[in-house]
Image (cartoon, helix red, strand yellow):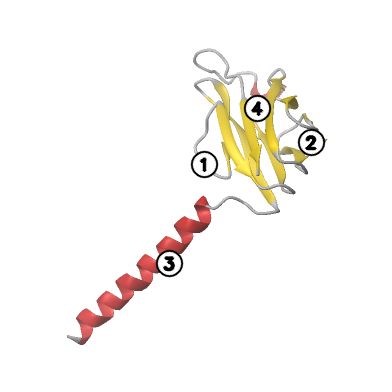
């Protein structure tokens, strides 16, 4: 009897911890920093991911006013982050011209902001990497609440 109680208690603790972790992973960032990461992939050449989510050519994210979005370039080519529409945002180091380069966007006003990247040529050391299909056009829509 005592063993069954211990098993039930352990299972309950694991369920509570798992629920807490899942909730924190899905929560939108408050005033702080969120991350979008660009990576190389065989189909479509490159894609990006928001805060560890799945990699896609087009992302739509929501953040709070006052937050900073960091874009990390882990692709085999340089990217320049370009704002295509929206209110003015504070964009620093948009030219991500080496591996792990970062661009930062600070959002001080509520609204909808749209971004893309202008990709450059592969770095010389990565020129033999093969891709399938046409290169993805990266699109990012940020809704600031």
N-terminal label among 3 and 2: 3
The numbered mark, 1 or 3, whose residue comes first in the sequence reads 3
Q: Is residue 72 above or below residue 18?
A: above
The C terminus lies in quadrant: top right
Q: CA distance from mark 4 to mark 3?
A: 38 Å
> In this figure, which residue is indicated by the disc labeled 3?
17
Kindly indicate whether the residue at mark 2 contacts the one at mark 4 (C-beta within 8 angstroms).
no
Q: Are marks 1 and 3 in contact (CB under 8 Å)?
A: no
Name the residue that disc number 4 marks: 76
Task: Estimate the x, y position of residue 2 in percent, counting from the top left.
Answer: 21, 87
Quick one: label 4 or label 2, which is nearer the N terminus? Answer: 4
Q: CA distance from mark 3 to mark 2?
A: 37 Å
Q: Whole-percent x and y of residue 121?
A: 71, 17
Could one spot residue 21 in this view of the protein?
A: yes
Q: Secondary structure at mark 2?
A: loop
Q: CA distance from mark 1 to mark 2?
A: 24 Å
Q: Quadrant of residue 114?
A: top right
For marks 4 and 3, the one nearer the N-term is 3
Q: Nearer the viewer, mark 4 or mark 3?
A: 3
Q: Is residue 8 left or right of residue 38?
A: left
Please give the residue where the numbered disc 1 appears in the rendered image. Answer: 53
Q: CA distance from mark 4 to mark 1?
A: 20 Å
Q: Residue furthest top?
A: 134
Report how far apart the C-alphas of labels 4 and 2 lie in the structure. 27 Å
Judging by the rendered image, the residue that carries numbered circle 2 is 89
Q: Residue 45 location in percent, x, y?
A: 57, 21
Is residue 42 toward the left or the right of residue 120 in the image? left
């Amino acid at each position: 009897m005592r063993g069954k109680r211990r098993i039930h208690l352990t299972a309950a603790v694991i369920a509570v911890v798992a629920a807490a972790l899942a909730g924190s992973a899905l929560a939108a960032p408050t005033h702080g920093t969120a991350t979008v990461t660009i990576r190389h992939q065989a189909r479509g050449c490159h894609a990006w991911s928001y805060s560890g989510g799945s990699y896609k050519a087009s992302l739509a994210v929501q953040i709070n006013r006052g937050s900073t979005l960091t874009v990390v370039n882990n692709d085999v080519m340089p990217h320049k982050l370009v704002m295509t529409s929206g209110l003015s945002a504070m964009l620093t180091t948009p030219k991500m011209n080496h591996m792990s380069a970062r661009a930062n966007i600070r959002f001080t006003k509520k609204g909808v902001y749209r971004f893309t990247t202008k990709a450059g040529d592969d770095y010389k050391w990565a020129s033999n990497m093969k891709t399938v299909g046409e290169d993805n056009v990266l699109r990012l829509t940020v809704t600031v609440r």
